[in-house]
Amino acid sequence: MTERTSPADTQERPTGAAAGRGPTPQEAEAADRARSDVDLDRVEEHYEEMVEKGANVKGEGQIDPSS
């Protein structure tokens, strides 16, 4: 890494794994309001469909366990 591509300020350099900041009160309230708009059954159905699709992928993107 050259000086040109390295972070100029030590504040920009990662110091380790961190979860980041928590939600602001406004973000938490918005999440609570949005919760009633989510159809959990529909989300679960879509999730299961995508898991099944991913488990049966063939061709490019396929994970070969014998490698």
Image: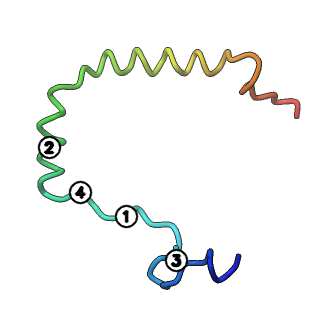
Residues 24 and 52: in front is 24
Per the model, the C-alpha gap separating discs 2 and 1 is 19 Å
Under mark 3, the amino acid is Arg
Q: Name the residue under label 4.
A: 23
Quadrant for the N terminus, please. bottom right
Q: In this view, does 52 lie above or below 10?
A: above
Q: Mark 2 points at which residue?
A: 30
Under mark 2, the amino acid is Ala
Q: Do the residues labelled 4 and 2 touch (CB within 8 Å)?
A: no
Q: Mark 3 points at which residue?
A: 13
Query: Callout 3: 10 Å neighbours few (<14), some, many (20+)?
Result: few
Q: Which of marks 3 and 2 is in front?
A: 3
Per the model, the C-alpha gap separating discs 3 and 2 is 31 Å
* Residue drawn at 68 percent across, 17 percent down: 57
What secondary structure is found at the residue carrying circle 3? Answer: loop
Q: Residue 20 carries which label?
A: 1
Under mark 1, the amino acid is Gly
Badge 4 or badge 2: first in the primary sequence: 4
Query: Callout 1: 10 Å neighbours few (<14), some, many (20+)?
Result: few
Badge 1 or badge 3: first in the primary sequence: 3
What secondary structure is found at the residue carrying circle 1? Answer: loop
Q: Do the residues labelled 1 and 4 touch (CB within 8 Å)?
A: no
Badge 2 or badge 1: first in the primary sequence: 1
Quadrant for the C terminus, please. top right
